[in-house]
Image (tube, rainbow, N blue to C red):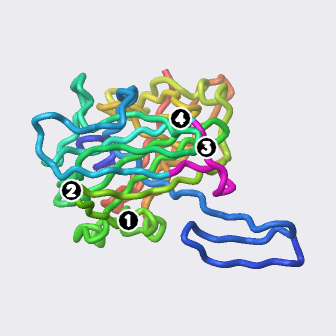
Amino acid sequence: MQRRTFIKNSTLFAAAVSTNGFIHFDGKQFIGDCATTSDILGPYYRPYSPLRNNLIVKGQTGNPIELSGIIRHKDCITPYKKAKIELWHCDNKGVYDNSSNEYRYRGTSYSDEHGKYSFKTILPVAYDAGGGHIRPAHFHLMITAEGYQPLVTQLYFSGDSHIPKDMYASSSEAKNRILDTETLLDGTKKVLYHVSMSKTLAAEAATIDKLTGIYVDEKDKSKKIELFQKNKCLWMKNEVFGENFEYVGNNTFEYPAMPKGMYATLYFEIMPNEVIKLTYNYVDDDLVKHSSVSIKE
């Protein structure tokens, strides 16, 4: 894919819209449906970022900003203690640190006993993702919490003129992830974002292990796809690290949070000789369907 290849029953019922989503009455109590929406992982994820919540790089310019919030369980109320939060973003020139040992503007932190987390960093900028497609400024977040599907999402900033033209940021699912920035007395900025975790259907780790490996294209032996496991999810390797796919049933894994009209799926068939065949289908921002069939080595 062009961009994603790195270089390119109750009788009593009530419902109401809240700031977190929808609230319904289950016959005993009101329950919030406030699961945080996901967004594309993007090609620049790197694991193992340093344990730190101050990402300011000495000697580098940029507008200081603090990102903070609360991680909650699926009930939207109970704080989640020790959730792992990974944050990464580009620098003030739109460049990601994809290789240095410094892991610039990348960090890992954990929520405290009240579910609170915070990072101090700089405000990222919009950048050209290729083909004249300008991505709005955004933070990347990955939240890992035992008992829940790892959450990958992106946070945007209100007033960004590039949002309406970006299929990801302008999606209806992203509207609660476009954040207002508050300017503090010292001139720095602050954004607040709360996260509520959600459970989704997941494949067993043993199943994913069976699917991992290198797949060779049936028509062009020089083309290969490498799949691996991380956080009990299936990943496709790219030049930086990889891209995650979620299990959606029927031997199919799907790239999450794609805009309308776009998708990417991995469909597996176990052949009689126990050879595993992978059919990779996707429609990228070119809106053209691409398909390939590969066999696991």
Q: CA distance from mark 3 to mark 1?
A: 23 Å
What residue is shown at x 66% (from left), y 25% (from top)? 206
Residue 188 location, x and y as percent? 23, 55
- Foreground mark, 4 or 2? 2
**Which region of the structure is painted magenta?**
70-81
Report the side of 260 relative to 221 (left or right).
Answer: right
Q: Which mark is residue 178?
A: 1
Q: Amino acid at mark 2?
A: Asp
Residue linked to disc 4: 234
> Picture quarter containing residue 163?
bottom left
Q: Secondary structure at mark 2?
A: loop
Sequence order check: which comes first, mark 2 or mark 1? Answer: 1
- Which one is nearer the viewer's eye here, 60 or 44? 60
Q: Which quadrant would residue 36 be assigned to in this image?
A: bottom right
Taking the spot 20% from the left edge, 54% from the top edge, the residue there is: 125
Q: CA distance from mark 3 to mark 2?
A: 31 Å
Which one is in front in this view, the residue at disc 3 or the one at disc 2? 2
Of label 3 and label 1, which has the lower sequence position? 3
Cα distance between the residues tagged 1 and 4: 28 Å
Q: Earlier in the sequence, mark 4 or mark 2?
A: 2
Is label 2 or label 1 in front?
2
What's the amino acid at mark 3? Answer: Tyr
Can you identify the residue that label 3 sits on? 80
Number of numbered callouts drawn: 4
Identity, as a three-letter code, of the amino acid under mark 4: Leu
Looking at the rendered structure, the secondary structure element under dot 3 is loop
Along the polypeptide, which appears first: circle 3 or circle 4?
3
Q: Quadrant of residue 15?
A: bottom right
N-terminal-most mark, 3 or 2: 3
Q: Residue 186: which numbered mark, if any?
A: 2
Lower sequence index among marks 1 and 4: 1
- SS type, badge 1: strand
